[in-house]
Image: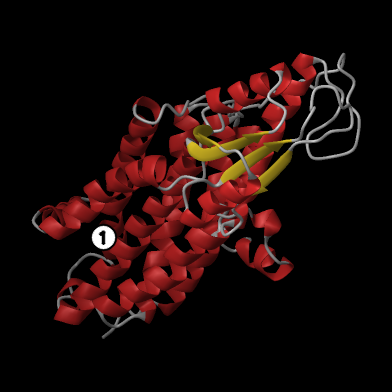
Amino acid sequence: MKQFISFIRKEFYHIFRDTRTMMILLLMPIIQIILFGYAITTEITSVPIAIFDQSRDEVTTKISDRLIASEYFDLYKMVDSEAEAQALFKKGKVRLVVVFPPLYASSPDASVQLLADATDPNEATQLTAYATAIIQQGKVDSGTMAVAGSGSQLSAGISPVVQLLYNPTMKGAYNFVPGVMGLILILICAMMTSVGIVREKEVGTMEVLLVSPIKPIYIILAKATPYLLLSMVNVATILCLSYFLLEVPIVGSVVLLFSISILYALVSLCLGLLISTIADTQQAAMLISAMALMLPVMLLSGMVFPIENMPDILQWLSNIVPAKWYIIAVKDVMIKGLGAASIMKEIGILVLMVLVLILLSVKRFKIRL
């Protein structure tokens, strides 16, 4: 054990004396959580809109005030014609125009027309959905009968009650924080472990390590242990930033959250070990890690794009991405407040991945050079 601890201490010295490595390990989580929490978000707020009110009655005025008062829309201009609205679209001044027909309040079959800039289809869909919900609620409150954008009828005495569970304010950070945790852990544990082992082979010091009294398996464990410990520091940093800066609640057990993170970090370490048996240079190890780990986490884990909307073959491929199961487990514990019994499937899959990757890595790892 003294030799093993000495090797771990040596690895910590190697990490701490490399400024670039320290910046990657400690600053990257902070930068990414801030970027995903504030800059990279799917939330839509303060969108400039125009209103073409041909009725100008009490009902349309109240609905217009509701639209303007919401956090989603800002009134750019009240227009007097559709031609003026089209001109604003062409200049890029507005992204939505609400058109009220003449005699709107007195006509039960009248409907509101929504003109949206669909150069970004997802944004246009969200904008029209937000506006439709606000207009419908405004109609219910004012006692009118017609539903916006359709010919169906809505009784003035019936009002739908919508309750958003777990994320009532619909903040994007609730989804991005577990994703960033999955991305950070797999990058740090897998990429840094693979680069660290390949560096020893590349500069020729692996021969010295292999002829030392300590067994090869302890050499690998000594190289992986510092990154595992630093990963837990990063998890704590991300959770603190999420809770205090992004106001994302931690409803479930923090101990369970760290336990899942340790299990996922072990999967990442085993991936890094497997990559180190394939790559011969540090550049190759980094390239393989980026292509084989970072892109699948970004695209196939559900971090950015819903897996349910993907083609069947991509949904199947997503099952072999460890981050998918980790993100599901973190959301269940962190956001929903569920216990270990509710995430046994995800835990079982991650444990299975650890065992398979260890067997592959040990089989491929060369103890002789």
| Color style of the picture | secondary structure
In front of the other: 193 or 326: 326
Name the residue: 35% across, 46% down.
Answer: 35
Label 1, residues with CA under 10 Å away: few <14, some 14-19, many ≥20: many
Q: Can residue 191 be seen in this view?
A: yes
Q: Residue furthest left?
A: 17
Residue hosting label 1:
223
Q: Is mark 1 on a helix, strand or loop?
A: helix
Q: In this view, does 184 lie to the left or right of 44?
A: left
Report which quarter residue 248 is drawn in. top left
Note whether 180 is above or below 269 in the view shown.
above
Q: Is residue 36 left or right of residue 11?
A: right
The residue under label 1 is which amino acid type?
A: Lys
In front of the other: 15 or 170: 170
Note whether 195 is above or below 160 in the view shown.
below
Q: Can residue 44 be seen in this view?
A: no
Report which quarter residue 307 is drawn in. bottom right
Quadrant in the picture for the C terminus: bottom left
Name the residue: 37% across, 52% down.
Answer: 184
In front of the other: 156 or 2: 156
Name the residue: 59% across, 21% down.
Answer: 65
Q: Which residue lies furthest to the bottom in this view?
A: 369
Residue 83 position within the rendered picture, expressed as x and y whole percent measured from the top left = 61, 50
Residue 51 position within the rendered picture, expressed as x and y whole percent measured from the top left = 60, 35
Residue 296 position within the rendered picture, expressed as x and y whole percent measured from the top left = 51, 64
